[in-house]
Structure formats: C-alpha cells, structure tokens
Amino acid sequence: MSTQTLNLDEKLYTYLQAVSLREAGILEKLRAETAGLENAQMQISPEQGQFMQLLLQLSGARQAIEIGVFTGYSSLCIALALPPEGKLVACDINPAWTDTAQRYWQTAGVADKIELRLGRAVNTLKQLLADGGAEQFDFAFIDADKAGYDTYYELCLQLLRAGGLLAIDNTLWSGRVADDNIQDDDTVAIRSLNKKLHLDQRVDISLLPIGDGLTLARKRC
C-alpha cells in the first residue's frame, strides 16, 4: 500500500500500457506520424486520450470544445467517444498541423462531428457565447498557449452547462510549477491558474498526475 501516487519508471509505464491501453489503430497511426515532428511532445499520451474518452462516455457528453488541436490526436479521441449526433468545436491557429488532423478525422469517419475553427481561440469562444452557446456544452479540453489558460478557463466556464466537465492539460508542467526559482511566463501562468482553481468555489476539482498533469474541473450548479 502507498500513501501517495506512485512514480512510473519505464518498466511500470510499459506494464500500465500493456494491461490497460485499448488504442484504436487510427489513433496509433496518427501518434506514430506525429512522433516524427519537431513539436511531437505537444501531443497527449495515449492513456490520457483513453481516460478522456471514458470521462466523455461516463458523462454522456454530446457537445464538446477543444482549445489546441495540434495534429488532432485528442480531437480524434473526443470525436470517437461522442455519440453519432455529438459535435466538437475544435480551435487552433495552425493550418499545417490541422491539415494532418483533418486527414485522420476523415479516415476515421468522424469529420462530420468536428467543426474546425482556425483563428484565435478567444475570438471563437466569445463568438460561441454571442451565438447563444452559454451553458450549452458538456465538455471542454484546454491544451494551448499557457499564457491564455486563465482566459480560456473563464470563457469555457460560461459555455459549460451546470455539471459540465473541463479538462486542463499540462498543469504539472514537468514539475516546473513546484520550483519557485522558475519564473518564465508559461510556468507562472500555469502556477497561477492552479492556485486559482484550488480556491474557485464555482467548480469541483481534481489534479491528476496523468501525462503532464491533467486538472478536471466540474462546473457546479
């Protein structure tokens, strides 16, 4: 028995994947293609994608938002977990990356579930609110520029229904958030949001040591 979370060495991590990961072939192919890119570390881990799929299925989510698409692995995970009538609004600014994403969405047969919006995510979220999207979404995933996290959080909170779930990636930031000697803009932004979430009575939270840290925030009624 352990009174704190286990650290995963390579052997235990390999075992974890061997006995729990059920990664669809299309996801495995996308992950392999992305691994050859310079920014490959931006992609979420397969076990995190599977965990998010389970959350979507448990919550019965139909309407979702993603901020930060990259090559589309997390988008594809979300879309595959949504019901046939489900919709995902996917926000990004880089057409080179999202071209890859769209190719895999099409191959997987979920392109009709995903509405890609290229441009600043803040503008997209504000437009969704202006179009009557307040409290209409079940799930949101934030995995984009860290300096924008707090703004994305506030806008997504308005878009989520009561009981809706917000997932925020990279909240442990490779441990840098715990080192007060590190004061770069990205680390400070994540550290600040973590402190804010801890005290925010609008949500129920849990920060999980999965991937690079995944915070779940459930909007209270």
Image (cartoon, rainbow, N blue to C red):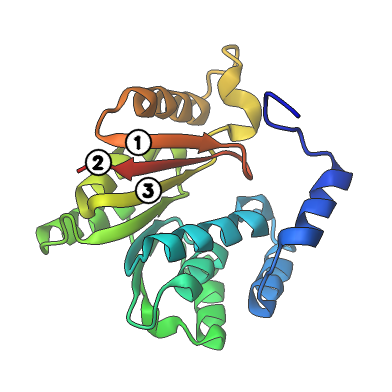
* Three-letter amino acid code of the residue under disc 3: Leu
Q: Is residue 212 left or right of residue 203?
A: right
From the viewer's side, name the closer residue of 2 and 112: 2
From the viewer's side, name the closer residue of 187 and 140: 140
Residue 221, x across and y down, in percent: 19, 43
Q: Is residue 129 left or right of residue 213?
A: left
* Three-letter amino acid code of the residue under disc 1: Asp
Q: Is residue 1 left or right of residue 126?
A: right
The tag on residue 204 is 1
Q: Residues within 10 Å of mark 3 (few under 14, many from 20)?
A: many
- Point 69% across, 69% down: residue: 22
Residue 169, x across and y down, in percent: 51, 44
Element type at mark 2 = loop
From the viewer's side, name the closer residue of 154 and 197: 197
- Between marks 3 and 2, how big is the CA–CA gap? 11 Å
- Between marks 2 and 1, how big is the CA–CA gap? 7 Å
The tag on residue 81 is none
Q: Which residue is mark 3?
A: 166
Element type at mark 3 = strand
Point out the tag, 3 or 2, that comes first from the N-terminus: 3
Residue contact between numbered discs 2 and 1, judged by CB atoms under 8 Å: yes
* Three-letter amino acid code of the residue under disc 2: Arg
Residue 83, x across and y down, in percent: 39, 77
Residue 209 sits in which quadrant?
top right
Q: Which residue is mark 2?
A: 220
Point out the tag, 3 or 1, that comes first from the N-terminus: 3
- Point 25% across, 41% down: residue: 220
In this rendering, which labeled residue sits more in front, label 3 or label 1? 1
In this rendering, which labeled residue sits more in front, label 3 or label 2? 2
Count of numbered badges drawn on the protein: 3
Instruction: Indicate the quadrant containing the N terminus: top left, top right, bottom left or bottom right.
Output: top right
- Between marks 3 and 1, how big is the CA–CA gap? 10 Å
